[in-house]
Amino acid sequence: MTAADASALVDRLTAVVADFPKPGILFRDITPVFADAEAFGVVCAELAEPFEGAFTAVAGIEARGFALAGGIGAQTGTGVLTVRKAGKLPGEVLSESYALEYGEATIELRPGQLPRGSRVLVVDDVLATGGTAEASITLLERAGYEVVGVAVLLELDGLGGRDRLASRVPVHAISSAPA
Ligand SMILES: O=P(O)(O)OC[C@H]1O[C@H](OP(=O)(O)OP(=O)(O)O)[C@H](O)[C@@H]1O
Ligand SMILES: Nc1ncnc2[nH]cnc12
């Protein structure tokens, strides 16, 4: 399958929900991509493709990034790190707070799970303002890892996410849509 085919697949399967989780937000629900076995395999391969050979672990961002990181980890034989919402991880954690398209959040990472210098690909479903991905990069770098890129299923245009990340790491989006 070509990159254009994968993009068309994401567009066809993504559900658009108005006024969720808040009035005025056009929510892009990508979970039908996970439910379709063939599509799920295709998008995991397509997310990793530009970074082939460059990463030794995949970091998934809670919650939908976890499924994608698991799929990529299984396909590429790499381990999975979980970047979690605050309060979910036991023991020592690193924390970063940031603003979202629809609110504020804090995410956390357990340090010390992989050797320092491990090369990590960050994956998530949607890139909107880029706040979540940028905070994830910061957490992973604070833990001593090298972030090789951010890969998402869908990039929302006009919210500045790509520009926000571009000075730090390469950004790969399978598809894009208006915010
Ligand atoms: O680019 P940003 O503006 O930071 O937005 C993108 C983030 O927002 C969504 O997660 P959400 O916070 O809704 O959490 P969930 O996946 O747990 O539902 C999405 O899954 C990304 O993680
Ligand atoms: N509009 C949106 N749809 C789905 N996930 C999002 N994360 C941030 N904005 C989003």
Image (cartoon, rainbow, N blue to C red):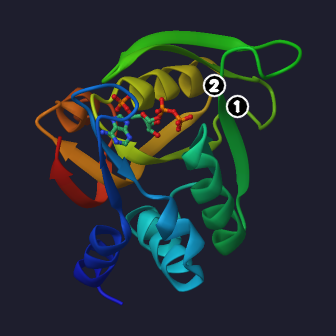
On the image, the x and y values in percent for residue 79 come to 74, 54
Which residue is at 42% across, 32% downward?
Answer: 133
Q: Amino acid at mark 2?
A: Gly
Indicate whether 14 appears above or below 177.
below
SS class, disc 2: loop
Q: Position of residue 125 (x, y in %)?
A: 44, 50
Can residue 159 be seen here? The reply is yes
Snapshot quadrant of residue 153? bottom left
SS for tag 1? loop
Q: Which residue is under mark 1?
A: 116
Picture quarter with ligand 2: top left
Which of the labelled discs sits on residue 12, or is there none?
none
Disc 2 Cβ-to-ligand 1 distance below 8 Å: no
At a point 51% along the width and 27% down the height, the residue shown is 136
Q: Does label 2 or label 1 sit earlier along the sequence?
A: 1
User: What's the mark number on residue 144?
Assistant: 2
Asked if the residue under mark 1 is in contact with the one under mark 2, i.e. CB atoms within 8 Å, the reply is yes
Residue 79 vs residue 6, the one in the foreground? 6
Few, some or many residues within 10 Å of mark 1 (<14, 14–19, 20+)? some
The answer to which image quadrant residue 172 occupies is bottom left
Q: Can residue 56 be seen? A: no
The location of residue 179, given as percent across then percent down, is 17, 40
Residue beneath the point at 45% across and 45% down: 148
Q: Is 95 placed left or right of 42 in the picture?
A: right
**Amino acid, disc 1:** Arg
